[in-house]
Image: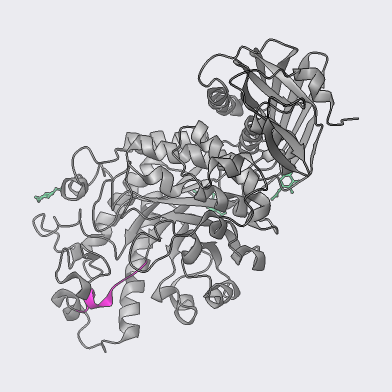
Amino acid sequence: MFDGTIWFLIIGLTIVHGSNWVWQCEDGYCKRESGQTERDGYSALKLCQLVCSNYLNIWPYPTGAVKSSKELVNINTKSIIFHYNGPTETVAYLTEITKYFEGHLKKDEPFSCEENLYNLKITFTPLCKEITSNLETNESYTLTLDSIGNEVNVNIIAPTVFGVRHGLETLSQILVSHNDDGSKCLSTLSNVQITDQPKYPHRGLLIDTARNYLSVDTIKKQIDGMAASKLNVLHWHLTDSQSFPFVSVRLPNMTKYGAYSSKKIYTPENIKDLIQYAEYRGIRIIIEIDGPSHAGMGWQWGPEAGLGDLAVCINKQPWRSFCVQPPCGQLNPVNEKLYIILRNLYSDITDISPDRRMFHMGGDEVFIPCWNSTPEILKHLRGKPLNEKTYLDLWAGYQRKNLDAYDTAIGHKNTSIVVWTSHLTQPEFIKNYLPNDRYIIQTWVPESDNDLITDLIKLGYKLIVSTKDRWYLDHGFWGTTNYYKWKTVYENPIYEKYTKAILGGEVCMWGELVDDSNIDSRIWPRAAAAAERMWSDPVTTADYAQTRFFAHRERLIERKISAEAVVPQWCAENEGECHSYL
Ligand SMILES: *[C@@H]1O[C@H](CO)[C@@H](O)[C@H](O)[C@H]1NC(C)=O
Ligand SMILES: *[C@@H]1O[C@H](CO)[C@@H](O)[C@H](O)[C@H]1NC(C)=O
Ligand SMILES: *[C@@H]1O[C@H](CO)[C@@H](O)[C@H](O)[C@H]1NC(C)=O
């Protein structure tokens, strides 16, 4: 009943000057043609794509059934009604996501489309009252859209508000605003049914605010990009040896000694604001305080305060002898006062976010020659052989006390602790040191190092995978590293091989060479390619996804995220004509 001709009746296109091109849907591609010819077409590429592209042009594509008509209808933007149907606890959340959704619709100039307008009624039905998310949160949703009389009725039903949010995001992607001959219209399809849920529960982006500071607004923009792409974890690498921007109320010296300036800091209010902002976009923030390595600035004040050295090798030169990156610094595992300081620091963090279910303790790139050259530590180890086992024991002892400090601060032992793969997490050592019911391992090995992943899974660990030679977005700008094109990011094969033990993954934007000025384009749209890998886990290649991907990049631009260009506009507008060019 829906053949490709009905839409002519509905939007009745007339093409005049200023609108040179129209698009025809042919063999699954939108082909651009001159609007002066006899044949009419869609007046905007994205209108054509809504009808013509796979999965209604949705990014990431839904994993369940997608059914739709090919008939377009125009929405009366002055008559959009929301109806909340669910536990009262969810109303505040739903009100917020409604505002966010409306923000996306009412861009630029007002809508002026006047013909055959439909009123839009959107009903949200979350079935549970929970309004915070974790690994077990059910993010599924069903979306149905029906046109009856002059009404378009949308129903989004989901176990949780997070599923409702994803459904609303999907809806915003199939509501297309476009200019027809000077009048702005909002159009959608007359009938749609979608069921959808993610393949992986942990779909993350790492940002690093220690190498270079990022403003709160810049972080919010990344959250917006994540929300548009249904990523759900912002991993915040908050501190490192270069700077300590986290304002600890109990330990004001940390930023006094560690922040780049009194402006380049994050107050508890900033962080609470970001956590809330993210939650309304379906995203949880996981904070990382890296240690024992990657700790220097901020930790210098111990001796003067009568606490001894909290960290050692701080700024020590020549740096290559004491760390992997300047400035050096590593926490002092033999100073018992360190653990009191850590406990206070963690109390400040759990005060900000008391229901925390996951916390990241870093643990990467511990540099033994630093400890090995520190008299206080050598004194402590006197009588023991200075071999690998002794240093691993020392490191693991630090980790045990560090964990105790965290558990004491939060008042229970229920938080999952994430650490990076390191010497300590090698399959031959890890079982002695890190219990698999407490620790989640984030792997950052290259794709070729599959064995480590297999081995850790066999040992019963749950993993977050950040394939270094595909998902390290900082690569390609330093040393011998390569830049990974969006297709390389998209086609990460790790996920095809394993399932349950892999919780998901994270693309990592290490901060050495990015700040407010360029981070958008370094992250986007490549992080969105990873987002589809983690949500949909496609068996198809990037070529099959590319027209949708190009369209999603435009969507990010519309949302004020400076996502880099991935193709000449001509290729985006002439689908199928630039195969294997980029
Ligand atoms: C989420 O809930 C939906 C609807 O009840 C169900 O079909 C689906 O299996 C659930 N997903 C998970 C991962 O439990
Ligand atoms: C902060 O550091 C100074 C040394 O610069 C020290 O005297 C003071 O006790 C420290 N403050 C706190 C609250 O630990
Ligand atoms: C910790 O987990 C246990 C077992 O699942 C649960 O009974 C307890 O309520 C949890 N405690 C907190 C504070 O979350």
Give the residue at x 83% y 31%.
4
Position of 322 relative to 8 (above/below): below
* Horizontal side of residue 269 vs 568, given as left or right: left
The front one of 542 and 165 is 542
Q: Position of residue 203 (x, y in %)?
A: 55, 51
* Horizontal side of residue 573 vs 443, given as left or right: right
Give the residue at x 71% y 17%.
14
Give the residue at x 53% y 54%.
486
Residue 193 visible in the picture:
yes
Q: In the rendered image, which quarter contains the N terminus? A: top right
Task: Examine the image and state in which quarter residue 121 appears.
Answer: top right
Residue 536 visible in the picture:
no
Task: Examine the image and state in which quarter residue 174 appears.
Answer: top right
* Horizontal side of residue 338 vs 285, given as left or right: left
Residue 205 included in the magenta stretch of the image:
no
Question: Which residue lies most toward the front here?
Answer: 37
Residue bounds of the magenta highlight: 364-372
The front one of 299 and 539 is 539
